[in-house]
Amino acid sequence: MKTTKLLIFCFIAFLTFLSVQTFAQEATGTETAKKMFTEKTLPVVTLSDMNGKKVNVSDLGKTGKITVFSFWATWCIPCKQEIKNIKGKLADWQKEADFNYMTVSVDDARATAMVKTYAKSQGWTFPTYVDPNSDLKRSLNFQNVPFVIIVDKNGKIAFQHTGYEEGGENELFEKVKELVKK
């Protein structure tokens, strides 16, 4: 009986330890989700725009301008809120800093029509691409949306961020302004 109680106690202690570790990781997740890069370039992956035109992602980052990619999905409420907030400020931001902004849906092929309908209903005038087989998502090695990357003028990934909190778009724009000045 004592052995059983000891085993139960050890099991509960182990689970408690795992819970504390997970909580600690989640508590610092905002900080660890933000990373600065210096060498990674966009992968050679083909996406389609809303009209079905194919485009190579690596070419999108070689425009000589800072380029922001917002990854999203039609089912992702925080994604849509982040893009809505960016859209509301984008015209003013682009007057202040010359950069490109585009979105990439990670919805599967069955949802491509919904992506197009949603983008049109929201009045999106910026480029929107679809990654229906998650080729780009796998190449960039991220799991969750919303996910944002900023590519510098030389086509290198300079910043990435996972998740969204209200007002987070302002921090994103600060990163863009820093990179535009370089």
Image: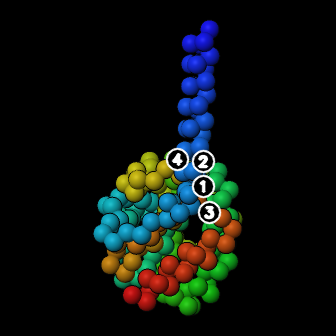
Q: Name the residue under label 4.
A: 108
**Viewer-side residue, 10 vs 28:** 10
Q: Which residue is drawn at 57% across and 91% down?
A: 95
Q: Is residue 31 visible to us here?
A: yes
**How many C-alpha atoms fall within 10 Å of the one at disc 4: few (<14), some, or many (≥20)?**
some
Instruction: Give residue 164's mark.
Output: 3
Q: Which of marks 2 and 3 is nearer the N terminus?
A: 2
Observer-side mark, 4 or 1, equals 1
Q: Name the residue under label 2.
A: 23
Q: Which of marks 2 and 4 is nearer the N terminus?
A: 2
Label 4–label 3 contact, CB within 8 A: no
Q: Which of marks 4 and 3 is nearer the N terminus?
A: 4
Q: How far apart are marks 1 and 3 (CA)?
A: 15 Å
Q: How far apart are marks 4 and 1 (CA)?
A: 31 Å
Q: Is residue 120 visible to us here?
A: no
Instruction: Give residue 27's mark.
Output: 1
Label 2–label 1 contact, CB within 8 A: yes
